[in-house]
Image (cartoon, rainbow, N blue to C red):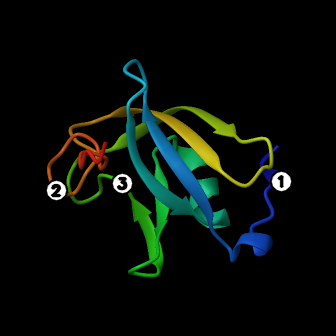
Amino acid sequence: MIDKIDFAKQGGLVPVIVQEEGSNEILMLAYMNEESLQKTIDTKLATYYSRSRNELWLKGETSGHYQHVVHMYLDCDYDTILLVVKQDGVACHTGEKSCFFHKVL
């Protein structure tokens, strides 16, 4: 099914929504290229593509806050990925559990 993702159409990257197993809390939004997607599938550890550093990024490699992939879903258009993960520690680099902690409404 992942071969239906048209990375070229999206500039080589697809958005990834990361959700915590059990609580269903949205933890973060990241991006994957083909290589990071394949590494994630092979290792069951979330690996993303860092747009700021222009390199692969194994979530937790520095912090120890790994994301263990439980499920992976593609949306109806095959252009967004949903990862359901078991989160070690916190997801946000600020120390918050989720990157979505700035309440607007």
CB atoms of marks 1 and 3 within 8 Å: no
Q: Quadrant of residue 96?
A: top left
The local crowd at label 2, few if under 14, some if 14 to 19, many if 20 or more residues have their Cα within 10 Å, is few
Label for residue 3? 1
Residue 90: give x, y in percent of width and height. 22, 42
Of pointers 2 and 1, the one earlier in the residue sequence? 1
Q: Residue at x 63, y 47 (%)?
A: 81
Of pointers 1 and 3, the one earlier in the residue sequence? 1
| SS at badge 2 | loop
* Above or below, 70 relative to 27: above
CB atoms of marks 3 and 2 within 8 Å: no
Q: In the displayed image of the protein, which residue is found farthest to the left?
A: 95
According to the picture, the residue beneath numbered tag 3 turns out to be 59
The local crowd at label 1, few if under 14, some if 14 to 19, many if 20 or more residues have their Cα within 10 Å, is few
Q: Quadrant of residue 38?
A: bottom right
Q: Residue at x 61, y 55 (%)?
A: 37
Residue type for callout 3:
Lys
Label for residue 94? 2
Residue 97: give x, y in percent of width and height. 22, 40
Residue 39: give x, y in percent of width and height. 57, 55
Label for residue 100? none
* Above or below, 101 relative to 6: above
Total number of numbered discs in the rendering: 3
* Above or below, 87 relative to 103: above
Residue type for callout 2:
Thr
